[in-house]
């Protein structure tokens, strides 16, 4: 069985697994990293959203063979470490607005929100409702969308105060 | 079909007609009785007035206090002992009347408990299921309130299935918090009382000199002992019957105040565990290759050996619902399903389509019975509602470990006792050999009233002889899962231009499966309060059960003379239990708010059209005809808060929806933008269409609202459901199969259709309304208001919802054989929109 090495949440790992197994299953079924959730397996629902070298991606739609030894995967579990803190400012905003209902979509929502805000801040922009309309494709079947909008805007402000978060 | 399979299928189906259920989802206010009739009844006996109750101290190393959850199983009550034969005849094979009587003889067997631990925490195993509605938080609040302990020190977990509770372990009908309001507080009050006793003994002081505060017992000198320090001293060695007085409402500091969810930190850090997240390395991923048509069956598996030898695959086994494959990863299960060569038998609804079912429904409308009176004119409309799907984001899942002679299951279930019984029956085990551990779920909306995932898992584990971690694919959920079926509402009024003289509503649905678990409860309680219900004369009829549920939930909110609403259902299961081919219809369930999203949408569309016909303002018309002051109050409030009649551009309009459920009156006002530039805005792969700009939702509140922040969340979620049901969210039926395979196809509300202005207004508590619950009531008024606003904006009212349903199929239909799509490989190049969606143009209704 081929070996694949990469970094997950700051930890270098090596897994023995067939090349075409998608990263979501490598994370969940092989490595036991269960923060990223399954909701569709086809890059639609976004419940699995995580970061690949600091940018959002959907591990359900990426074979492990496309991930190299220098690549860093960050899941919700590793998000606070990216800002050297117990909680990422976006997670704090999520708590503040009591966004979650069942919670199943929320790791993916937070990972997508962080990516969106980072991208906009790099462009020198603040997040708008229109940005959320087009970029936050994550399904929330509990319908927490309204609080998600509030939390993203709040989290974006909080991220301005952190070094790496902005 | 082989005899063997038929029996297995029968054991697994939820279609036995005499077992009804109730609604779904639950919320954050409380009362003394549940929707389905006396779930709480009383806790022990009331001694003096409303606040003193009896309970127990149980023998244990630290103090454990208990309250009786309901009165049905108290040992001395012979009627109670005779009634609770578990609802499923397959269950009775193993857990029969004698078991029930035996259980009933244990006077404390149906108690719920609160335990104080030496570390100062308090724990409680709740007998309701957290599905996102916030019941875990609300129950923790009740305990924190009654015991004077910080909520962070209260641990609320799920009790496993407890058959001795019979009807008292079910989650549905927005009753979860209402039903627990008193018993949980009684147990907490007894525990606190005992801690006070222990401290008084230690200090040799009178109990009355002591107070409890923030998890400690204080004496007048200021000295304190923590609950943890007292936990062992407070323990008893023999069960003791004791009484306790509940805190007066005027002292409430926690109940009624906004409280953030107790599981929020676990959720935002990815630590919250759902069934498939559990750390059980031997329970390998397992999926089922399902038939291409609804409820089809396996004829033969033509290459099982070959698939068995694929990388990662450990087992292939035919089960009732298809061919189960177990592998090292779910990805390899998907590969195996793609490689499987299975010959299928067609399903029982083969050949049906949206049009054929709509015709069946329209043909089944019974004739009108209320005649017109002289000088009146008939006004008639007919509205069709497409099939939809529960689609919780977490699909059906379960871990099962079936061994020789025993089984253990971990899964979400709203009726764990039913789940345990069905699994026992399927596996041929006694109920007592099956442990069913309840896990919180990633949503329900009616899905977890049925145990399709746990049953698949149990059967696969038994056939493979190994533990399994079973999951449905998303496409399986749409194509073989459950939801609210197609319905047609036909309404006729006679009016004289000034006044409406009569109103009749013929409501026809495809069979709605209320499953096991609620049947006996309905038969007992509802027929006793309403001896005229068809259920009283025909207790074995699924239709009668549905009609009873309909009667219990349909409320025409306007005074329009003699008013009659009647439900008919087609496609009932055609054969009785125990015979072959019992699964003869669609897979349905009591989806969030059961019939009412559609009943109320039709009602309000009709009222709008009638008001227009009579030349009246749509708001004034509603206000004037409101059936009572509470309806009038919410209609007036919503119009005021929503600024009814304000000037809006052409193509933007307001709509109002009105409804009452669980003693709470609600009204919703929305503004919807139907201008072409909005309707035609493009989101890759997304259905856009009209945009709801603004929502104002007003509701009366029953007594004892536990968590206003949770109630608001439930209403906000219900509002999103309402928007999607009016606009985008449906299944298309063609050749006996549903076409949808992903969320981009199914089109539940996404951010691009979310209003940026949502206001929820909860009125002061209504002292007359004992029962409440906000899990469902947000849906129907919003769905209705959105449909009405679209009608008004366009100048022509929709008669088919969602409005997008007949605007074509804006997606490429994924193959039905193999039944699930393979995962893409280009995820690094396509974010956030999937590759396919980036190429597609969206199609707008
Ligand atoms: S599971 Fe990855 S996008 Fe849905
Ligand atoms: S919180 Fe349940 S799916 Fe989003």
Image (tube, coloured by chain):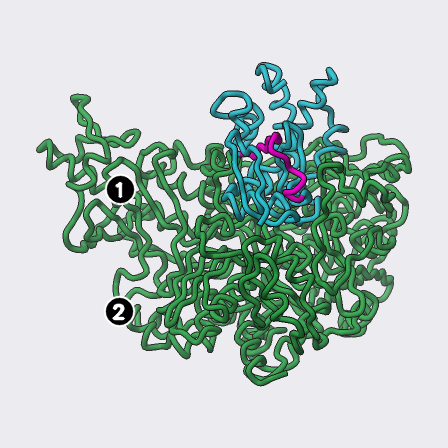
Chain colours: A cyan, B green
Q: Residue A62 at x, y = what percent?
A: 68, 42
Residue that numbered label 1 is attached to: B116
Q: Residue B812 at x, y = what percent?
A: 82, 54
**What residue appears at the point 38 percent right and 54 percent down from the top-left corner?**
B159
Residue A102, visible in the rendered structure: no
- Label 1 and label 2 in one chain: yes
Against B737, residue B584 (above or below) is below
B288 relative position to B254: left or right: right
Structural crowding at the residue carrying mark 1, measured as other residues with C-alpha within 10 Å and reported as few (<14), some (14–19) or many (≥20): many
The alpha-carbon separation of the residues under discs 1 and 2 comes to: 27 Å
- Please state the chain letter of the residue tagged with numbered disc 1 in the rendered image: B
Residue that numbered label 2 is attached to: B105
The stretch in magenta equals: A63-76
Q: Secondary structure at mark 1?
A: strand
Against B538, residue B627 (above or below) is above
Q: Residue B273 at x, y = what percent?
A: 48, 45
The C terminus of chain A sits in image quarter:
top right
Between A85 and B452, which is closer to the camera in this rendering? A85
């Amino acid at each position: 069985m081929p070996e694949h090495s990469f970094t997950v949440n700051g930890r270098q790992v090596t897994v023995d697994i067939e090349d075409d197994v998608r990263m979501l299953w490598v994370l969940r079924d092989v490595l036991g990293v269960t923060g990223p959730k399954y909701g569709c397996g086809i890059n639609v629902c976004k419940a699995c959203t995580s970061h690949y070298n600091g940018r959002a991606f959907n591990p359900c739609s990426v074979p492990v063979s496309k991930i190299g030894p220098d690549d860093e995967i960050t899941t919700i579990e590793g998000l606070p470490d990216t800002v050297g803190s117990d909680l990422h400012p976006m997670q704090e905003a999520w708590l503040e607005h009591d966004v979650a209902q069942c919670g199943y979509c929320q790791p993916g929502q937070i990972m997508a929100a962080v990516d969106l805000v980072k991208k906009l801040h790099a462009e020198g922009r603040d997040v708008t409702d229109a940005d959320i309309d087009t970029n936050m494709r994550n399904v929330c079947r509990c319908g927490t969308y309204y609080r998600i909008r509030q939390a993203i805007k709040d989290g974006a402000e909080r991220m301005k105060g952190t070094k790496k978060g902005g | 079909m082989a005899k063997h399979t038929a029996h297995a299928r029968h054991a697994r189906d939820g279609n036995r007609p005499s077992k009804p259920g109730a609604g779904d989802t639950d919320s954050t206010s409380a009362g003394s009785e549940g929707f389905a009739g006396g779930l709480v009844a009383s806790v022990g006996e009331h001694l003096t007035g409303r606040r003193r109750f009896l309970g127990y101290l149980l023998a244990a190393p630290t103090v454990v206090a208990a309250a009786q959850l309901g009165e049905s199983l108290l040992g001395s009550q012979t009627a109670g002992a005779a009634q609770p034969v578990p609802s499923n005849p397959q269950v009775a094979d193993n857990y029969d009347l004698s078991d029930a009587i035996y259980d009933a003889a244990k006077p404390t067997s149906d108690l719920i408990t609160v335990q104080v631990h030496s570390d100062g925490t308090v724990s409680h195993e709740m007998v309701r299921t957290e599905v996102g509605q916030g019941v875990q938080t609300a129950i923790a609040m009740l305990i924190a309130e009654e015991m004077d302990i910080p909520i962070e020190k209260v641990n609320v977990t799920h009790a496993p299935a407890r058959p001795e509770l019979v009807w008292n372990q079910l989650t549905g009908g927005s009753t979860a918090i209402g039903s627990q309001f008193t018993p949980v507080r009684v147990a907490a009050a007894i525990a606190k009382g005992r801690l006070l006793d222990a401290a008084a003994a230690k200090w040799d002081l009178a109990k009355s000199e002591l107070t409890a505060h923030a998890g400690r017992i204080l004496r007048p000198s200021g000295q304190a002992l923590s609950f943890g320090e007292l936990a062992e001293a407070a323990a008893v060695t023999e069960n003791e019957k004791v009484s306790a007085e509940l805190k007066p409402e005027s002292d409430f500091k926690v109940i009624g105040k906004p409280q953030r969810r107790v599981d929020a930190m676990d959720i935002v850090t990815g630590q919250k565990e759902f069934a498939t997240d559990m750390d059980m390395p031997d329970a390998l991923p397992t999926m089922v290759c399902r038939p291409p048509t609804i409820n089809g069956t396996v004829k033969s598996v033509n290459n099982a050996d070959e698939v068995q030898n694929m990388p990662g695959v450990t087992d292939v086994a035919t089960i009732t619902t298809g061919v189960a494959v177990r592998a090292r990863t779910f990805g390899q299960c998907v590969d195996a399903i793609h490689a499987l060569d299975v010959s299928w038998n067609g399903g029982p609804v083969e050949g049906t389509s949206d049009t054929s079912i709509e015709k069946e429904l329209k043909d089944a409308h019974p004739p009108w019975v209320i005649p017109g009176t002289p000088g009146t004119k008939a006004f008639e409309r007919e509205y069709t509602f497409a099939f939809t799907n529960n689609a919780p984001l977490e699909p059906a899942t379960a871990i099962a470990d079936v061994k020789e002679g025993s089984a253990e299951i971990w899964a979400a279930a709203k009726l764990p006792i039913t789940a345990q019984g069905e699994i026992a029956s399927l596996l041929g085990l006694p109920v007592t050999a099956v442990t069913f551990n309840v896990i919180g779920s990633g949503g329900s909306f009616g899905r977890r009233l049925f145990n399709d995932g746990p049953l698949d898992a149990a059967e696969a584990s038994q056939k493979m002889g190994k533990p399994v971690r079973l999951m449905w694919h998303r496409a399986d959920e749409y194509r073989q899962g459950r939801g609210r079926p197609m319905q047609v509402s036909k309404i006729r009024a006679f009016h004289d231009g000034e006044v409406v003289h009569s109103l009749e509503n013929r409501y026809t649905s495809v069979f709605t499966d209320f499953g096991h678990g609620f049947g006996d409860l309905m038969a007992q309680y509802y027929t006793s309060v309403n001896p005229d219900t068809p259920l009283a004369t025909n207790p074995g009829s699924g239709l009668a059960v549905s009609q009873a549920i309909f009667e219990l939930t349909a409320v025409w909110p306007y005074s329009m003379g003699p008013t009659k609403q009647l439900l008919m259902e087609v496609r009932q299961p055609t054969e009785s239990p125990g015979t072959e081919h019992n699964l003869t219809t669609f897979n349905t369930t009591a989806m969030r708010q059961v019939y009412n999203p559609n009943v109320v949408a039709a009602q309000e569309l009709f009222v709008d059209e009638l008001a227009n016909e009579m030349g009246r303002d749509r708001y004034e018309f509603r206000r004037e005809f409101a059936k009572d002051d509470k309806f009038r109050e919410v209609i007036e409030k919503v119009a005021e808060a929503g600024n009814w009649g304000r000037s809006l551009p052409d193509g933007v309009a307001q709509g109002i929806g009105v409804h009452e459920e669980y003693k709470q009156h609600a009204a919703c006002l929305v503004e919807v933008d139907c201008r072409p530039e909005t309707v035609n805005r493009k989101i890759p792969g997304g259905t856009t269409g009209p945009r709801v700009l603004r929502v104002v939702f007003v509701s009366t509140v029953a007594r004892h609202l536990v968590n206003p922040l949770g109630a608001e969340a439930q209403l906000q979620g219900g509002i999103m459901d309402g928007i999607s049901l009016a606009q985008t969210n449906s299944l298309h039926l063609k050749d006996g199969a549903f076409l949808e395979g992903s969320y981009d196809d199914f089109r539940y509300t996404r951010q691009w259709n979310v209003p940026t202005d949502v206001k929820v207004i909860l009125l002061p508590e209504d002292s007359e309304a004992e029962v409440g619950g906000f899990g469902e009531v947000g849906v129907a008024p919003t769905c209705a208001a959105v449909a009405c606003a679209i009608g008004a904006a366009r100048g022509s009212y929709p008669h088919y919802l969602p409005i997008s349903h007949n605007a074509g199929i804006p997606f490429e239909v994924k193959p039905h054989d193999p039944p699930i799509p393979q995962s893409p490989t280009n995820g690094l190049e396509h974010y956030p929109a999937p590759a396919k969606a980036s190429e597609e143009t969206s199609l707008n209704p």
